[in-house]
Image (spheres, coloured by chain):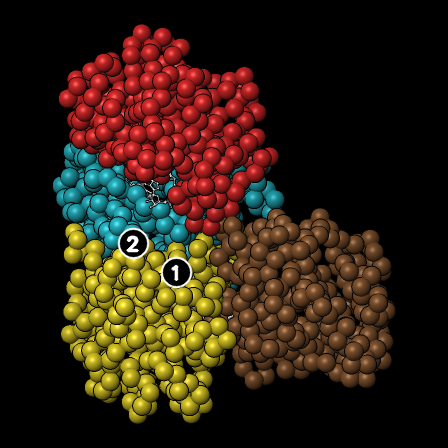
Chain colours: A yellow, B cyan, C brown, D red
Amino acid sequence: MVDLNIKIKDLLFKNPVLTASGTFGFGEEFADFVDINNLGGIIVKGTTLEHREGNPYPRMAETPSGMLNAVGLQNKGVDNFINDIYPRIKHYDTNILVNVSGSKIEDYVAVVEKLNHLDKIPAIELNISCPNVKEGGMAFGTSCASAALITKEVRKAYNKIIMVKLSPNVSNIADIAKSVEDEGADSVSLINTLLGMAIDAHKRKPVLSTFTGGLSGPCIKPVALRMVWQVANRVKIPVVGLGGIMNPIDAIEFLLAGATAVQVGTANFIDPQISEKIVQGIEDYLELHNFKSVYDIIGLINREK
Amino acid sequence: MVDLNIKIKDLLFKNPVLTASGTFGFGEEFADFVDINNLGGIIVKGTTLEHREGNPYPRMAETPSGMLNAVGLQNKGVDNFINDIYPRIKHYDTNILVNVSGSKIEDYVAVVEKLNHLDKIPAIELNISCPNVKEGGMAFGTSCASAALITKEVRKAYNKIIMVKLSPNVSNIADIAKSVEDEGADSVSLINTLLGMAIDAHKRKPVLSTFTGGLSGPCIKPVALRMVWQVANRVKIPVVGLGGIMNPIDAIEFLLAGATAVQVGTANFIDPQISEKIVQGIEDYLELHNFKSVYDIIGLINREK
Amino acid sequence: MKKQIKDFVIIQNQRVSPDSFMLRLRCFDPLEEIKPGQFVEILVNNSQSTFLRRPFSIHDVDYKENIISVYIKIVGDGTRQLAYSEEGDYLNLVYPLGNGFEILENKKVLLVGGGCGIAPLLYLSKKLNEANNEVDFAFGGKSHDDIFSIEEFEQEGCVSISTEDGSFGEKGYVTQSQLMYQLEEYDAVYTCGPEPMMKALAKLAAEAKVECYVSLENTMACGIGACLCCVTETTKGNKCVCTEGPVFNTKDLKW
Amino acid sequence: MKKQIKDFVIIQNQRVSPDSFMLRLRCFDPLEEIKPGQFVEILVNNSQSTFLRRPFSIHDVDYKENIISVYIKIVGDGTRQLAYSEEGDYLNLVYPLGNGFEILENKKVLLVGGGCGIAPLLYLSKKLNEANNEVDFAFGGKSHDDIFSIEEFEQEGCVSISTEDGSFGEKGYVTQSQLMYQLEEYDAVYTCGPEPMMKALAKLAAEAKVECYVSLENTMACGIGACLCCVTETTKGNKCVCTEGPVFNTKDLKW
Ligand SMILES: Cc1cc2nc3c(=O)[nH]c(=O)nc-3n(C[C@H](O)[C@H](O)[C@H](O)COP(=O)(O)OP(=O)(O)OC[C@H]3O[C@@H](n4cnc5c(N)ncnc54)[C@H](O)[C@@H]3O)c2cc1C
Ligand SMILES: Cc1cc2nc3c(=O)[nH]c(=O)nc-3n(C[C@H](O)[C@H](O)[C@H](O)COP(=O)(O)OP(=O)(O)OC[C@H]3O[C@@H](n4cnc5c(N)ncnc54)[C@H](O)[C@@H]3O)c2cc1C
Ligand SMILES: Cc1cc2nc3c(=O)[nH]c(=O)nc-3n(C[C@H](O)[C@H](O)[C@H](O)COP(=O)(O)O)c2cc1C
Ligand SMILES: Cc1cc2nc3c(=O)[nH]c(=O)nc-3n(C[C@H](O)[C@H](O)[C@H](O)COP(=O)(O)O)c2cc1C
Ligand code: FES
Ligand code: FES
């Protein structure tokens, strides 16, 4: 029997497979395809203080081995989450994390204060890396100082687990990871989307209403793996890796690079059952190669260097 | 008749299609496939002051819609270029640019001083963005101050056209472009490769001998397009766009985003005739849509906004 | 019906015109009830440039044989690759997706289709006829090549056709055809096709004070309401075309 | 011969074993002279995960019919997709690449192949026989499935076989076979196969003071000397396997 459990601080995950924010709705959208209770956790859509309509259509462009999105944090606001959605999903027997976004630090703080009281939300993912909003969003995640500051303020206001989601659109992601660790983050997750653009050469216009959008999917996996490896070698808190994971082997690559857990994002769009299949695939891999626990392979490429 | 000419400062290119450094050898490797004289220009392999052996094998990993390389500037040094290679290739009726790399500013300066005297080399591409060497390389390209400093020193030593090749592994590429423009760069080219990594889950080891390498190919095109658009809106000097161009339509997307010319890189490996086909394809596109000159479409997505 | 993900086997791939084809796909399990206007998301195998699934309307359903028909027009790499698929090949489908058309009862309705927007109207008309409606069709296309399954449609109602080049039926846009002057005679209009056509029709229907249901074809990533990429602006804010549509009453749209 | 890029038509795709096949590819133009040991880079169509061309040795050349034979073992997505290709399909090739084997004259030579490293040895042996050499073969594989074209090889020389599971020929590694004790009898050894096999053989050949030519299979991006990805360390620094190899005299390698 293989032990799939992993821990972030004192929070236990039954396996290292979470679903990425913005790609798995509130879990309910996938209930016909996946037994949510078999996942390590789900991270719900980016939630802000106020209701947001997001960006105008078109918001999506397909790219080589990936896609751009410019959804722009469309969501009904944290109160709607607490009153309408939370009661519907809190019965899931898995860790539900809320991805918290905003334009101002005060907004982030206001959101997490409201989430503090929800029994079945053991952790938040602090999104300081959304490339699709005009204010805030990624701006917080591209300098050590601002990343540290927002983490510090949110840490004061939230007493459960904080996972900070890092932006890849930076010169040195390991420095930023270190600075949020120093301010009390319990974990970092990476990567959010790379800022990209698509142009329609026939119409001679950008494809997205916002010109730029966030790139996700297998095309970004090499960048994500590199960053996870760099960050895992820099911080002591658990690193959660994501970016282009399409199958169990991809997930294992992230674990080998030093991630304690992974998130599955865009892949959910192509195979809505993939998250559960990845749990199974990791178990099979560990068994096949006689590993006893997920921890036996975390960061293994360094140890065997 | 469509006018394919473009200019960088006073240097005329017969069309906007160049081949990217490190992907087209010295042109000779492609002589069986392409009439080099039909290209706008060729940029030869990264050249350093001294002979370099590069990194150990394996140096290559295939990735979704792209590849990683960790060649690490293997080259025989600038003197060998001047004495052995230049005499063989100087007869080409196209612009030959030398891609100049190094670990120290003094080395860059020493190389360009030697190149100053070569009649048929009208320009250099200053590579401050190579991710595959331990010292120098990309480090120069990831801060405005260091990018400005090296440009300034090289500008003093070199009196022909300087194109500075920018690294995409930064938080704000437009700022870096602006700072090299301010120091006298005549053009910027972007993007060099994104720093990435590949892991072999079966061997539980990194694929590359150097762990990390540079990501190229269509997977990076969305990021490259975005950066070209950002930079073209920031600087006045001509921008040369590259990253994942596989066909004429891709090249046109870069022109529409604001590039004055493009470079074709990894695509040469898959279709050794592609550079010439792209020249033809751009001409056909302009004709079909009744444009008179390449300049009619440069930056068009902004103008039609 | 719950959403499913399943392999279907291709039992027929028939060229309809130089750039379109009809796939008949058999499910190994009994098909549960599908609503007209719902669609499928097909995984395209072996196309280097096709990353996401591709959405297609359900043209017809045969519950006895467990067969879904899908009409596909070749417009890019994904549809081109599907065109090469052969009888006996498997295709992976996520289905049935979307809300589908509302089925009125005992009414007189006009179904207007343009190009591949004709596809969802066959199964829709069958369901409308079952509910005792009187069904007429108005189809438009660039040329004869864009019009298909006419025999099947004629069994469900009276068909009038317009083509831009006049190669079949009246010459001109479907929204300029004779029928458009008699919209008041109908209780409702159902339509699917290019956006300009649907917008023109929505306007005519509004003028004639007739309910108008449109089926949108916004680009999609997930098809199941998770990504929020496919939204359209409605009077109640952005709504997902894949789950809250593809069918909307035009009075709810910000057109 | 100049390097070419051309479409070839598949005239035969024959399964050789459960996981390998032989492609016979016809060129529309007369084939110019190809050297044994040279290889082709094939563009894989319709494989989502295959971005670069794939290199394969030239197994045999038929100048009369303008046919190149290529033996392919299925190891990943690219080779799997090629396995599905059918007679009449086109494949795009860049060829002929690499330096090829040096052809001695009037000598006694041993050709040692392991697995798909057996492939280049057929055309090589034909050229060696034309140059009046005496040719023997020693082939190794995991099992019978890895050994192919034996009838053709037997026309060119005496073949001895080893398999790891003993399902064909001697049981064991080819480098442990009888023949290895008589290496001194040969003027040269030519080999292609897995690196451990070639290294073991190079050592035996060095001990026996016999020239040893090895054909390397480093991973490649361009195949034409442009990317510098495929290098191997030699006594004269890094050399490109695709242009300065794939064949090296082992005394030049840093093995
Ligand atoms: C709910 C729904 C139902 C559909 N039903 C059918 C159907 O029954 N039959 C049918 O043939 N097609 C239908 N479509 C459209 C079909 O999904 C697209 O034609 C297909 O995805 C194109 O894939 P491709 O890879 O061939 O083209 P791509 O290479 O992806 O695109 C080719 C060109 O078509 C454009 N394009 C692609 N998708 C769309 C879109 N959704 N709207 C506007 N332009 C687009 C692209 O911008 C590009 O210019 C439907 C779409 C939706 C959303
Ligand atoms: C000069 C040369 C000649 C060759 N001749 C033949 C031949 O005649 N017949 C034949 O079947 N194969 C030959 N090969 C090997 C062949 O090119 C690879 O098997 C093929 O590229 C694999 O493609 P794939 O997409 O199926 O596998 P991939 O998915 O690319 O790889 C599958 C697995 O094989 C490994 N792999 C891939 N390529 C190589 C390699 N070059 N060396 C070591 N491991 C590798 C990968 O690391 C991976 O583990 C030759 C290679 C070279 C360089
Ligand atoms: C449509 C879409 C919406 C997303 N929304 C969010 C979001 O609200 N908050 C967030 O932190 N990340 C969001 N992301 C980023 C993903 O969570 C993930 O970081 C990214 O897609 C990379 O992983 P992948 O390649 O596996 O998709 C979104 C991604 C997509 C594709
Ligand atoms: C094998 C290889 C070697 C390269 N060597 C160099 C180099 O020496 N100097 C340089 O500036 N860029 C080098 N590059 C980067 C390319 O010039 C180009 O910036 C990059 O590959 C992105 O373009 P592409 O996606 O079209 O290949 C190299 C790229 C590859 C793939
Ligand atoms: S396509 Fe994802 S929400 Fe509609
Ligand atoms: S494969 Fe590019 S140099 Fe050999």
Residue D108 in percent (x, y) is at 29, 12
Q: Secondary structure at mark 2?
A: loop
Q: In the drawing, what numbered circle is on residue A247? A: 1
Of C197 and A254, nearer the camera is A254
Q: Is residue B280 left or right of residue A109?
A: right
Which chain hosts label 1? A
Q: Amino acid at mark 1?
A: Asn
- The image shows residue A38, relative to residue D132, as above or below, that is below
Which residue is painted at 40% across and 36% down in the image? D145
The front one of A202 and B233 is: A202
**Up/down of B230 relative to A120, above or below:** above
Q: Is residue C216 left or right of residue B196?
A: right
Residue sitting at x 85%, y 76%: C182
The answer to whether residue A186 is left or right of residue A246 is: left
Q: Determine which of the numbered discs, if any, sits on residue B201 in the image.
A: 2
> Is the residue B72 above or below the residue D117 in the image?
below
Q: Secondary structure at mark 1?
A: loop
Label drawn at residue D115: none
Report the Cα–Cα distance between label 1 and label 2.
12 Å
Q: Is mark 2 within 8 Å of ligand 2?
A: no
Q: Chain of mark 2?
A: B
For disc 2, the neighbor class at 10 Å (few under 14, some 14 to 19, many from 20) is many
Write down the quadrant of residue D229 in the picture.
top left
* The N terminus of chain C sits in image quarter: bottom right
**Residue A48 spot, x, y in % from top left:** 38, 82
Does any atom of ligand 3 lie closer than 8 Å to the CB of label 1? no
Question: Does A147 appear above or below B45?
Answer: below
Instruction: Decide: few, some or many residues near mark 1? Use Cα within 10 Å; few <14, some 14-19, many ≥20.
Output: some
Kindly check if marks 1 and 2 are in contact, taking CB atoms under 8 A apart as contact.
Answer: no
Q: Amino acid at mark 2?
A: Ala
Q: Where does residue C133 sit, x and y in percent of width and height?
A: 81, 80
The image position of residue D184, as x and y in percent, is: 20, 15
